[in-house]
Amino acid sequence: MKKFAVAFFLCGVFAAFSQSKDLPTGYGGVTLGMSIEETKEVLKKNTDFGYHGDRDVSLLPNENRALIETDTEKGHVISYLERCWFQFYEDSLYIITINVNREKMDHYSIFEALCKKYGSPDTVSPEKSVWKNDAVTMSLERPLTLKYVDQATFDKLQNASLVGPSGTEMSREMFLEGL
């Protein structure tokens, strides 16, 4: 916990002395907004991800969604990465999730590097640190996961999946309002 407090302080110092930059939209050549085919091509070229071809791609029926999952351990690839997930909606990459190998890298080092490059996180909790702008949300989550999210697509899917209150919930609210 002490390291976390020192890291947060250092992040503020770095932010004060460096100009905040735009947030990245991905890692290793894979960026949000790419099509499935573009992503596959980049994954084939960058062996750090451990991509094994089309067997790593799953299509989710009736939802216009696809998922590519990679695993460096299956391919015996020496990498700082472990497993990665690339989520698509309407053939556009909207979430990149990267699990970093905890035997080779630590949370503090990544947190410090992100603070140095992008300034203080917008929110910090014991579970994760989040940097955000209008287009992208980047988070460093515990134990050691980096996540990049296309905010517009994510918000669109969140809003579409909202379910209205049930009849029981509405009558409960009406009862409470009548008190």
Image (spheres, grey):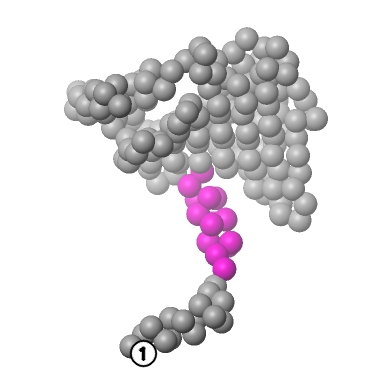
Residue found at the very far top of the displayed protein: 78
**Closest to the observer: 21 or 169?**
169
The location of residue 152, given as percent across then percent down, is 50, 50
Disc 1 crowd, CA 10 A, few/some/many (<14, 14-19, 20+)? few
Q: In which quarter of the image is the N terminus?
A: top left
Residue 87 covered by magenta stretch? no
Instruction: Give the main secondary structure of the magenta stretch.
Output: helix
The residue located at (51%, 77%) in the rendering is 169
Residue 114 in percent (x, y) is at 37, 25
User: Horizontally, is 96 left or right of 1 in the view?
Assistant: right
Residue 120 drawn above or below residue 175? above
Front one among 36 and 165 = 165
Q: Is mark 1 on a helix, strand or loop?
A: loop
Residue at (68% x, 23% y) in the render: 71
Residue to which mark 1 is pinned = 178
| Residue that appears at 54% across and 18% down | 101
Q: Where is residue 122 in the image (x, y as percent from the top left)?
A: 31, 40
Q: What stretch is highlighted in magenta?
A: 150-163
Residue 117 visible from this viewpoint:
no
Kind of residue at disc 1: Gly
Compare residues 98 and 125 and report the one nearer the observer: 125
Q: Is residue 42 above or below residue 157?
A: above
- Examine the image and state in which quarter residue 156 appears: bottom right
Answer yes or no: is residue 63 visible.
Answer: yes
The quarter of the picture where the C terminus appears is: bottom left
Q: Residue at x 50, y 36 (%)?
A: 148
